[in-house]
Image (spheres, helix red, strand yellow):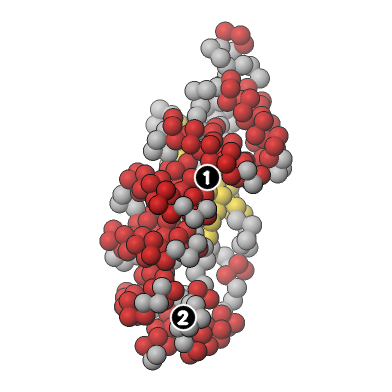
Amino acid sequence: MAHQPSLSRIVPGVGILVLAVVVSLSLAAPPVFAQRGTGRMAGIIKNADGEGLEGVEITAYNPRLSPSTLTGSSGAGGRWSMLGFARGDWKFTFVMQGYITQEIDVSVSSANRNPNFDVTMDPLPEGAGATGAGVDSESPELFREATAAFEAGDWTIAIAKWQEFLSLNPQMPTVHGNIGNAYRELGDLDSARASFEALIAAEPDNMMANYNVGEMLVEEGEIADAMVYFERVLQSAPDDPAVYYNVAELYFSQREMDSAINYYKRALEVDPSYLSAHMQLGFAYVNAGDIPNAILAFEKYVEIAPVDDPMLAVVKDVLAALQSG
């Protein structure tokens, strides 16, 4: 959902001095994709009854970073924690025998605290033969085959098997999310959106489905429509600044600076000490041509950043360049 901070976000026209600072610093800094991060993710994994699940295998994957894969497992009470994340978009996979595999895309920060990442896992249906109220004895295998096909990049096969599984198990609407992810990988965005909308119809507050539809609408330039879905996400976690920040990052990536600024500011209303939000707000203001407010945002970052913050020197240099005109 989010994107790596980059000084190249300062657009031409701001000033030759600023651009010179951008180039020299970007050449001197080690590439982000080659660094192991310091971010931490944690949460609780529960079953449908709210009981913690111990022993869930967790994999986080981001092909743009190195290392690209981090692994862990849940402990007592379903609690889990993983360290070493670089900032970026990670695909989390939660696997446990007897349960439907969960795949969730999450934006991770390495400089600020990340929100608790709690997951609910639904059980696979037991083989119950013809008396199983619409549940076929082969349905668990169908789901496993679909998951294997998805992991192998066989999106069409994964979709077909998940659809068959869902037809046998209509009480498990979360499978619509798996189908939607596969359609997105396939490039069929209309079908992907229809799948996510089906999940939203069953679970109106489903954060993953609402975010995915909002993200697709932003990519299509339908900003007003996207905000309806993002507001649902935000209503599910109104006190979580990272949610506002992630929405802001998406708008930034699409060059929608007014919306990005709005959501960075909303993140800071919830948590005034959110360092990344101050920095990205500054870059958003620069891209919007509002240098005075960009200076204020960067000044606040410098004021509250710890002395060992890895971006502090960069922000100080950019701030000095902006202040000197």
Q: Position of residue 259 (x, y in %)?
A: 39, 61
Judging depth in this view, the residue of 293 and 37 nearest the camera is 293
Location of residue 264 (image quadrant) = bottom left
- Could you tell which of marks 2 and 1 lies nearer the N-terminus? 1
SS of the residue under disc 2: helix
SS of the residue under disc 1: strand
Q: Which mark is on residue 189?
A: none
Kindly indicate whether the residue at mark 1 contacts the one at mark 2 (C-beta within 8 angstroms): no
Judging depth in this view, the residue of 158 and 218 nearest the camera is 218
Q: Which residue is mark 1?
A: 104
Query: Which residue type does callout 1 highlight?
Result: Ile
Whether residue 160 is situated above or below residue 71 in the rendered picture: above
- Badge 1 density bin: few <14, some 14–19, many ≥20, Cα 10 Å: some
- Badge 2 density bin: few <14, some 14–19, many ≥20, Cα 10 Å: some
The structure residue drawn at horizontal position 46% and vertical position 87%, both measured from the top left corner, is 15
The structure residue drawn at horizontal position 40% and vertical position 63%, both measured from the top left corner, is 260
Whether residue 35 is situated above or below residue 226 in the rendered picture: below
Query: Which residue type does callout 2 highlight?
Result: Val
The structure residue drawn at horizontal position 60% and vertical position 52%, both measured from the top left corner, is 61
Q: Position of residue 287 (x, y in %)?
A: 44, 74
Q: Quadrant of the C terminus?
A: bottom left
The structure residue drawn at horizontal position 43% and vertical position 50%, both measured from the top left corner, is 226
Whether residue 303 is situated above or below residue 241 in the rendered picture: below
One can see residue 49 in this view? yes
One can see residue 320 in this view? no
245 displayed left or right of 97: left
Q: Position of residue 151 (x, y in %)?
A: 67, 42
Judging depth in this view, the residue of 164 and 290 nearest the camera is 290
Whether residue 279 is situated above or below residue 166 in the rendered picture: below
Q: Which residue is mark 2?
A: 314
